[in-house]
Image (cartoon, rainbow, N blue to C red):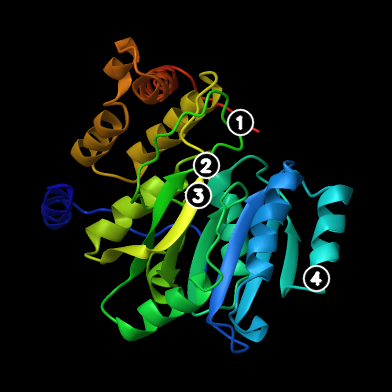
């Protein structure tokens, strides 16, 4: 239903489809670029790096781009150096727009060389040693597929009380792979987005009629949604408010309502719903405040 509605919107309205990244061409024989954005939490980052070391995929076919926020840290540089003998690592400390995930994703994307781009979170866990090999086979063997969604499951490494819900298939940067050609056509992400820049990207991805596929044989683990306070949801709401200058008003309003639709769930006693509801409330508050304030929220 969402795809049908968005396609109708594209035909009716003039939508600005380009993001803010000039994506370079693939080069140097790299097939898969794994882009990981991080700041702190090095013990978690080391886990995903260890899982990439264990891949049975040839090292010369994939690279790992580590984008560290806040201009980088000595500890982050040291970790990248420690893994550089085991992985084809590119360490890229962010140079500006700290805390802006859209810019941070583009920063890594601009430095990537692979035919396929796999976005990963620092707290993503991959246990399959043939994950990259299978991913390459799927995208190579199915040219009509523009993006791959692995099956996600809940991990408990960060969660007090073992909150176990995880959306199994969701196109977010915690673990989603794209063809470089799609990212080039859409010019990557919108740089000023603080969070959920991947959600906005998927809107444009859908508007131009690209196809994603759910792949149950590819699996990953990721902590469930946790919203300890309203700071980040408010900042994300501010980012989506900024789409008012890019999207037709009716489409912008539908996007805002869709992102805030879970707010009433905060009244329910189930933890999953309360987390989703807390995010919806914070998001809506961020949009409303942005109507009256010129300065956006910052989240670092």
Where is 280 relative to 225, above or below?
above
- From the image, tell me which residue sits under label 1: 299
Kindly identify which residue carries mark 2.
155
Where does the image place residue 125, in percent across and percent down from the top left? 57, 53
Q: Earlier in the sequence, mark 2 or mark 3?
A: 2
Q: Are marks 3 and 4 in contact (CB under 8 Å)?
A: no
Foreground: 265 or 110?
Answer: 265
Which of disc 2 and disc 1 is earlier in sequence? 2
Tell which circle, 1 or 3, labels the residue nearer the N-terminal end.
3
Q: Secondary structure at mark 3?
A: strand
Name the secondary structure under disc 1. loop
Q: Secondary structure at mark 4?
A: loop
Q: Which mark is residue 221?
A: 3
Residue depth check, mark 1 versus mark 4: number of the one nearer the observer: 4
Q: What element does badge 2 sit on?
A: loop
Q: How many numbered callouts?
A: 4
Q: Does the residue at mark 1 contact the one at mark 3 (Cβ under 8 Å)?
A: no
Q: CA distance from mark 1 to mark 3?
A: 25 Å
N-term-proximal mark, 2 vs 4: 4
Q: CA distance from mark 2 to mark 4?
A: 27 Å
Q: Are marks 1 and 2 in contact (CB under 8 Å)?
A: no
Read off the residue under disc 4: 84
Q: Position of residue 17 (x, y in %)?
A: 33, 58
Mark 1 or 4 closer to N-term?
A: 4
Residue found at x 55% / y 22%: 231
Tell me whether circle 1 and circle 4 mark residues in contact (CB < 8 Å). Answer: no
Query: Residue 279, image x and y in percent?
Result: 42, 24
């Amino acid at each position: 239903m969402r795809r049908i509605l968005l396609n109708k919107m594209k035909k009716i309205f003039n939508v600005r489809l380009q993001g803010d990244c000039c994506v370079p061409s693939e080069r140097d024989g790299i097939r898969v670029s794994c882009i990981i954005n991080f700041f702190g939490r090095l013990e978690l980052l080391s886990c995903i790096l260890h899982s990439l070391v264990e891949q049975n995929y040839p090292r010369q076919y994939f690279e790992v781009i580590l984008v560290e926020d806040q201009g980088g840290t000595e500890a982050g540089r040291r970790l990248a150096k420690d893994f550089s003998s085991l992985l084809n690592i590119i360490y890229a400390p962010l140079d500006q727009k700290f805390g802006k995930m859209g810019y941070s994703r583009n920063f890594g994307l601009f430095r990537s060389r692979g035919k396929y781009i796999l976005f990963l979170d620092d707290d993503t866990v991959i246990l399959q040693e043939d994950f990259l090999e299978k991913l390459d086979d799927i995208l190579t063997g199915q040219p009509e597929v523009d993006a791959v969604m692995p099956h996600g499951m809940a991990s408990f490494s960060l969660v007090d009380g073992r909150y176990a819900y995880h959306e199994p298939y969701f196109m977010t940067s915690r673990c989603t792979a794209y063809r470089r050609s799609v990212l080039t056509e859409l010019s990557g992400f919108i740089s000023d987005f603080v969070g959920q820049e991947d959600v906005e990207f998927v809107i444009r991805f859908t508007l131009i009629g690209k196809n994603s596929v759910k792949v149950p044989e590819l699996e990953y683990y990721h902590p469930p949604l946790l919203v300890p306070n309203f700071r980040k949801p408010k900042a994300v709401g501010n980012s989506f408010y900024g789409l008012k200058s890019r999207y037709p008003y009716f489409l912008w309003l539908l996007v805002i309502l869709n992102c805030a639709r879970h707010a009433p769930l905060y009244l329910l006693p189930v933890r999953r719903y309360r987390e989703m509801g807390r995010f919806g409330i914070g998001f809506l508050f961020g949009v409303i405040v942005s109507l009256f304030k010129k300065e956006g929220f910052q989240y670092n």
